[in-house]
Image (cartoon, coloured by chain):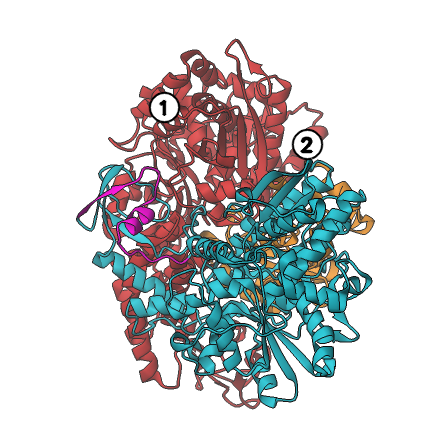
Chain colours: A orange, B cyan, C red
Amino acid sequence: MGNTDQAVLEKKKPLEEVVKKYPASRENLISILQEVQDAYGYLSRESINGIGRYLNLPASKIYGVATFYNQFKLNAPGKIQIQVCRGTACHVKGSFELLETVKRALGIDVGETTKDGAFSLETVACLGGCSIAPVITANGKFFGRLDKKKVEDLIAKWKQGGVEE
Amino acid sequence: MIKIKINDRDIEAKEGTTILEAARAAGERIPTLCHIKDMFPSGACRMCVVEVKGRPALIPSCAYPVEPGLEIKTNSQRVITARRMIVQLLLASHPFDCLTCTKNGFCELQSLASEYGIDRVPFKGATRHHYTDFSSPSICREPDKCILCGRCVRICEEVQGVSAIDFTRRGFNTMVLPAFEMDLSETACVNCGQCVLACPTGALHEVRVIEKVMQVLQEGKKHVVVQAAPAIRVSLGDFFDLPAGSNVTGKVASALRRMGFKKVFDTDFSADLTIMEEGTELVHRIQEKGKLPLFTSCCPAWIKFAEINFPELLPNISTCKSPQEMLGATIKTYYAQKEGIDPKDVYVVSVMPCTAKKYEALRPELSSNGMVDVDAVVTTRQFARLIQLYGIDFKTLPEESFDAPFSTSTGSGDIFAASGGVMESALRSAYHLITGKDLAKLEFEDARGFQGVKEATVNIDGLELKIAIVNRLANARAIAELVRDGKSPYHFIEVMACPGGCAGGGGQIFGYEPERIQKRIQALYQIDKTRDVRLSYKNKPVMDLYKDFFEKPGSHKAHELLHTGYNPRTTKE
Amino acid sequence: MSGIFIGMGTCGLATGAGKVKTAVEKWAQAHSMKLPITPTGCIGYCQVEPIMDVVTDGGVRVSYSNVTPEVADFILDETLVCKNYKLDGILGQFRGPKSPLPGVPFLDEHPYFKKQVKYVLRNCGVINPESLSDYKAAGGFQGLEKALGMGQQKTADEVLKSGLRGRGGAGFPTGKKWAMALANPSDKKYLICNADEGDPGAFMDRSILEGDVFSVLEGMMIAGFAIGADEGIVYCRAEYPLAIERLIMGIDMLRKEGILGKKVGKSGFQFDIRIKKGAGAFVCGEETALMASVEGRRGMPRPRPPFPAKSGLFGKPTIINNVETLANVSHIMREGAEKFASIGTATSKGTKVFALTGKVKNTGLVEVPMGMTLREVIFDIGGGIPNGKAYKAVQIGGPSGGCIPTEHLDIQIDYETLKTVGAIMGSGGLVVMDEDTCMVDVAHFFLDFITKESCGKCIPCREGTKRLYEIVESIVSPYSKMASEEENLLRFNKIMNMEELAQVIKDTSLCALGQTAPNPVLSTLRFFKKEYEAHIYDRKCPAHQCKGLLKYEIDTNVCTGCTACARKCPTQAIVGERKKAHYIVDEKCVRCGTCADVCRFGAVKVS
């Protein structure tokens, strides 16, 4: 679910502005982490320390929460973030092979980003698109009813000109 | 009282207790791993599961309150199978280097494996791995041996309010690590070692020093002397099957002598010295309207805690060094001079109930003329190891005394290891410094006790002195915040990082047992009671030391050697 | 007046409903016709989306399936211009107050819908989820009014009388849970709607939130009223952006209307709702882990007692209800408990929404009365197995559930009956499997999922499920050429331990995730033992799915030596000279299947 709005990323809104939407209370930690990740694309060490100062929470607590949840990325993501759904329906329809195809086509493993920063790859437990399984998303856009060839073609297309809006 | 049945025995359990507590009170054994006494149950390890009639699954006895009519089985086949399998599962992820592990013989996992007769580990597969962290001068982390019981995390967070480490990641890959998985030395860790006490396995232990000490002794090139802290004399017995709080002062001295230390000194002596300096400082600040409240400074974990979290309060902290450091400095100057030994050849070892003292000895401020005040710090545990290594039969050791000139101590010096002891000692002497008289009643009951915060108002000849005594750093944080915000009514605050004071220090025998700490504290007050001299200013050798060397408390020389300074400190972000 | 409805839930959008909308707008412009387009949620027939409904001049609504922009043009031409309704791909006409179209089938008689009973999904795909007036016209907020009039205790009693049981999977009687919280006095109580829906293959809650969000909000208000809470929190997984959007919009509208955030009518009841997004942790569907997450902590469960109804969020009495449970509540209060209780079996009342997916002709959402058999759901509604394949099993209950084989297909869907065959109701995921599905792989898949989602707090789940996974992995993983005797012995050893390990995990885990983690293994072991034996003893996968047990070989009689496979092989496992028969080196082969795909001569044989 990454928001790779280049404009926001480039503008780099100061952290104080991003977090002030939420009162400085522990219970808002996860919402704040989500907000900060939306603003910067991922959670950098500076961000986490800044949030710690805002909430008066030790960095270890925030790091512990950030590493617990799948959603949070601690490394900068690629320009195109691909999620391969590994839910039951997708699995039964062949998402495992799909994942292998994507891994091979991009040359990276799950959780990694390509060296040129163009692509990053994740798996998701279930995206809810079970009726059009197997499903992948690219920057949040759904692509369903896929097979090996369709996915290879999509990736080739994206390598050329990015994901269409 | 509630009537329940445990293993077909009729038991009366106190209302509001858990099945675990009721079983233990009735003498039924239930093992635990993640349980910390007096703290809210975590329910993580599942070792304490029991079978309860009418319930389909096994119940964690640590979290289930007693109800009338419960029928509990703590040793049914189902329960034992479950417990065995849990131990086997733990062993499957655990390195098998028991024989070379620092915790060999003290490891709770080892004990459980033995207790449950584990003869094989039927699972073989993935294990967790993280590098061993040697960065801290006090605490060594071996995450591979961690069983994720969470005791260290809870102690560091809830009792100490530091949270240097926490659970990270999720599922099988969970590990207890500092933020960003950085080195411990870069975090806000204050080296108190409470996590080491809490850790059931060898995942956390103190930095090794035994080999270094043995080598120095063996080489014979240096004049090696040793000092033993007040707490040691009532804690060492734990390692030799003596009841908690047994007074083994004489054996401490003889054991150390047998190891080959040239001189065996008593840190209690310098505790009295500290009182002289600190009492003078307190009176001076009160009379000259100096910075108040005054915080004590003998606890290095507290010092580091303050440097990180309350840099604005550093001027409030006493500039006095801790007793071990004062004695070290005195040894390398006064004593070396007196004995005609080149100070560079003097090697000072101290035996402490504390892991933070290892960090303290390395503080750059705590040296003079290029020589550190204390060269090596050995914890109570390491001392026991040394006794074992040297083949010393503790039981048959004779009672000996410490060596002059640092052997005499007063009751005031002895109680330093108890939370409230420094305060009490300081008050006894402060009374004299202010009024010139001796106190009639020397016991300050308000200062005594295991609870985390104690307050009192003391009347010294019309002067109303408001005092506070805190142990456990979470409490220290609260008090420090009051002071920082200008809301504190206190003049003098004693801070000890560990529960109950140094008697509950991070260098003591493993395990978190409040009763044991309390017995040690009681023993110390008992020693104080039986002393002829109980007032620091009546310690003749201390007075002689001033006459011969320091002139008077607070003198220029005293300040040079017995006082220090502090610096704000940041953790790596 | 004519109008168009388009199903624009997530699955509708994923199949191109957005493009259909644009096409309709263009058509309307081209024909200078005023054609209001109403987006709806998902009506459940996801297999044939996008779905578009046309409302005739006579006010009759007709539904069409598999609508692309071109098909849309065609439909609009035929229906609105030529008044010809009976087209290919017609699903049927809605029943309504107006006279039905002659000769046109009814939607509710369509084989997909015929056996369904739309109780909780009655509005999804029918009304505009973004219109409060639409919701009210369909009876919305009458349930709340009734509840406020009856009072807290009577409301809880009514829900208890209806027999509604938690639809998240546990099946605890909802009314009873509410009564427990009501009985605990406190200055503050919370009502949490669990919209985490983590079961892979389940999207019932998502569709309800997208298609009929007000029903959930009203349900929350009724529940909040009954227990004495003034604050409601929806914990919705972040992977559902449209659902979250609808929630935000719904709450906003209700606040503007003064229904949320202000005292409602004369009752003095005041309630407000806020949203907390999940951050990607299946375990946070568990009550206590959910609350930990709301409190800003790692989502790790805690032991119970104390139960949330007594001490929950921030230590206050808290009730957590599933989306589907709450969506039922407004209808129960409005129409009465008896109507709900008249549907279903003796112990399981009402309907259940299932997400029917996998190897079945009609994938989508179905709502059926409790007591219907699985056979009816899969074959009558679902249309059976596509491509002429044979049915093998249906997985019910997600990673906590079990697989049900042919011999139990006639089992009635009921909380208790399902347990007798080693399964659970679960949240509603129904994944159909055919003869090409390997059941050992299914167990492997779920264990992989569980090990990744385990929170790691308790030993039996953290360590035990990992070891269970490794045992199953050793069954499906490659044949090792070396020391096979030793390896076989190890494997047998492990398998013998498997059942004991599974039992301990069930007995001692801290939360339901761990307690139910062994279910898929135990269930597949129970009904498909032969498959396991084939994997273990024969080292073969009968369904040809377990890559590690497949062997890729080149038939030297067919191979022409064109080198196409050798060039494409990602691990350079194929050796051979041009024009000479090639050979696959087994140790290097990762069973990706590229060579088989690339070979124009069919020389690659898989066994």
Q: Secondary structure at mark 1?
A: helix
Check if mark 2's residue and mark 1's residue have beta carbons within 8 Å: no
Q: Is residue C313 above or below residue A122?
A: above
- The residue lying toward the viewer, choosing from C345 and B409, is B409
Q: Is residue A2 above or below residue B15?
A: below
* Mark sitting on residue C606: none
Mark 1 belongs to which amino acid? Val
Q: Is B126 left or right of B86, judged from the image as shown?
A: right
Q: Which of the two discs, 2 and 1, labels the residue nearer the N terminus?
A: 2
Q: Is residue B463 above or below residue B33?
A: above
Q: Residues within 10 Å of mark 1 (few under 14, many from 20)?
A: many
Task: Please say whether residue A138 is one of the residues in the magenta stretch.
Answer: no
Q: Secondary structure at mark 2?
A: helix
Which residues are drawn in magenta? B9-33
**Quarter residue C433 falls in:** bottom left
For the point 53% across and 73% down, the residue is C594
* Chain letter, disc 2 residue: C
Task: Please say whether residue B15 is one of the residues in the magenta stretch.
Answer: yes
